[in-house]
Amino acid sequence: MTTNKKCLFVAACAAAASIVAAVSLAGADKVAGASSADNINEEAKILSALEDMSNDKNYVMWNITPEEGRLLRILTEATGAKHVVEIGTSIGYTTIWFCLALRTTGGKLTTYEIDPYRISLARENFKNVGVSHLVTIVEGDAHKTVTRLKEPIDILFIDADKAGYFDYLIKLLPLVRPGGLILAHNTVDLASEMKDYIKAVTTNPTLETIFLHKDTGGISVTLKKRR
């Protein structure tokens, strides 16, 4: 091949490579744009369902407030949580707030509930908003069933029998990773029913606790310190 032909061949190859690269980038941008739009649509669907649930007085069973739900979503996404454990599923309202974040962190949630009726409602709600694949429901007395859990926990959320908070903490604290969070609902208005829990999270030197949303019952946010 002559020098001129070689130059032409190299130039042609470079041009072809540029075209392929441009097409690939354009395709990638389209895929990314479609993916982003899909995520926005999915989130809007979930938020709409949560609003319907919070407005239905016949449907709400001791759920958190929407403002508290946003707090849980922010904490979950900000920490990049991969495994959330929830004690007290109820109808799945709180669970769905967690799932909003877990969709983006690539995480999952294990939730515990003793009432079969509430479990059936929760399953239906998870299905309706498309988060069933993120959630594992464990039916039965959580005081017994949580002992089977072996995986590390990034966020533990407790919203069940108030007198049992301390027992859940003792059993699951070893699984909470350093830097992980323990969140508990109603720790202000029902503090008298969970004295042992509150004492444990405020006096243990390996934990740091603050109390938020005091006007709606209170959520305690406890950090398991890194050593």
Image (tube, grey):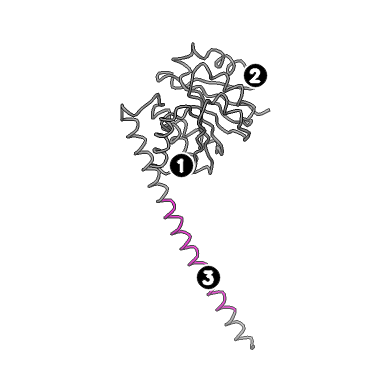
Between the C-alphas of marks 1 and 3, the distance is: 43 Å
What's the amino acid at mark 1?
Ser
Residue numbers of the magenta segment? 10-36
Of labels 2 and 3, the one closer to you: 2
Q: Secondary structure at mark 2?
A: loop
Between the C-alphas of marks 1 and 2, the distance is: 38 Å
Of labels 1 and 2, the one closer to you: 1
Q: In the rendered view, tell whether residue 128 sits above or below residue 141.
A: below
Q: Secondary structure at mark 1?
A: helix
Q: Secondary structure at mark 3?
A: helix
- Residue pictured at 40% horizontal, 46% vertical: 40
Residue 12 image offset from top left, x and y in percent = 55, 79
- Choose the circle earlier in sequence order: 1 or 3: 3
Q: Which mark is residue 18?
A: 3
Q: Which mark is residue 41?
A: none
- Choose the circle earlier in sequence order: 2 or 3: 3
Query: Of 111 and 108, which appears nearest the observer?
Result: 111
In the shown orientation, is residue 35 left or right of residue 207?
left
The quadrant in which the N terminus is found is bottom right
What's the amino acid at mark 3?
Ser
Residue 46 image offset from top left, x and y in percent = 38, 40
Residue 53 image offset from top left, x and y in percent = 34, 33
Q: Residues within 10 Å of mark 3 (few under 14, many from 20)?
A: few
Query: Of 143 and 199, which appears nearest the observer?
Result: 143
Residue denoted by label 1: 132
Residue denoted by label 2: 205
